[in-house]
Structure formats: structure tokens, C-alpha cells
Amino acid sequence: MMTVVDDDVAIYRRHADELIRYATALVGPHDAADVVIDGVLAAFASPGWSTVMNPRAYLYRAVFNRAASVRRSDARRQRREAAVALPDHVEPSPSSVDAHRALAQLSPQQRAVVYFTYWDDLLPSQIAELLDVSEGTVRKQLARARDHLRRILDAH
């Protein structure tokens, strides 16, 4: 007889690879696995987990939320470090643009929409379901992401 823990393990195993790819697009390869584990554990510990109708979408949302938290924390740390750094000890940033840096400048929701659109080749309706937002929000975030990336690329 399968227990709730066995069900959770099976759900995690079924979606782990795709969640790690998704988290990599959101926070980069170094933090992706931690973000997935933290997000999945938070989802499993949630009081509403047992009533979730779409576990995959719920896990994507949990990973998204954890990634956003990590990015906020990193931004606070970087601001603190910049405030105490001496100007002669700070290296100038390179002027070349790479995709990871350009994507890192997007909001977490914009990165998620770009990831699902271009890496997973999902339709706006499918993305909306996964992110638990409207299809219009998906289209708007994708347009904003494209505009932002275009400005970055045009500047270089």
C-alpha cells in the first residue's frame, strides 16, 4: 500500500528534472537544485497540498516563489556588499553581453515566461496554467521581456 510520503516521492521524481531546468532559468545553475528542493519541500509541507488538483503546476509555482525569494536575498546582499566596497577594489563589469546576464536582468515572472516560451515551447495558455496567472499576463510579461532584452542588446 502506497503512503502519502510514497506518493510525494513519486511526484517529485516525475517532475524533478523539468523543475531543475526551470529553476536554472530563474536563478542560474549554481542555485537551481537548492531552489527546487526548498520549493518542493515547502509545497509538500503546505496545509493545502493534499487537496491540490494539479501537483505539477503547484510545484512550478513553489519553485518560482522560492526563486524569487533567493533573488531578493541575493539583491539585498549585493547592495550591502556594494555599500561597503571601496571604489578601487571593485572591478568594472565587462561590456560584452551574454544571454545569462541579459536574462538575469528580467523579473522572475518574465524569466519564467521566457523559459516556458522558448525552452519548453509552451503556448501562453499552458504557461498561464503553470504559473497560475491569466493568459493576458503571460503575453504582457513576454512582451515586456522582449522589449527589455532588445534594449540590452541594442545598447551593446
Image (tube, rainbow, N blue to C red):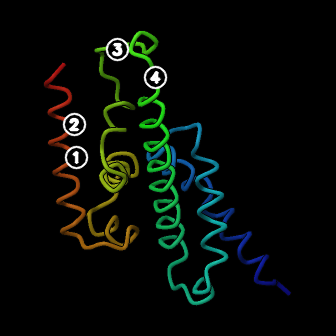
Q: Report how far apart the C-alphas of labels 4 and 2 lie in the structure.
A: 29 Å
Q: Which mark is residue 28?
A: none
N-term-proximal mark, 1 vs 3 = 3
Compare residues 120 and 26 and report the one nearer the observer.
26
- Label 1 or label 4, whichever lies nearer to me, is 4
- Label 3 or label 4, whichever lies nearer to me, is 4
N-term-proximal mark, 3 vs 4 = 4
Q: Which mark is residue 145?
A: 1
- Label 1 or label 3, whichever lies nearer to me, is 3
**At 60% across and 72% down in the image, what residue appears?**
43
N-term-proximal mark, 1 vs 4 = 4
- Tell me the element at label 3: loop
**At 24% across and 62% down in the image, what residue appears?**
138
- Label 4 or label 2, whichever lies nearer to me, is 4
Amino acid type assigned to the residue bearing label 4 in the image: Ala
Instruction: Tell me whether circle 2 and circle 1 mark residues in contact (CB < 8 Å).
Output: yes
**Residue that label 2 marks:** 149
Is residue 124 toward the left or the right of residue 68 in the image? left
N-term-proximal mark, 2 vs 3 = 3
- Residue 16 x/y as whole percent: 63, 57
- Tell me the element at label 1: helix
- Tell me the element at label 4: loop
Q: Quadrant of residue 5?
A: bottom right
Amino acid type assigned to the residue bearing label 3 in the image: Pro
Q: Report how far apart the C-alphas of labels 1 and 3 lie in the structure.
A: 22 Å
Amino acid type assigned to the residue bearing label 1 in the image: Ala
**At 65% across and 75% down in the image, what residue appears?**
44
**Residue that label 4 marks:** 85
**Residue that label 3 marks:** 94
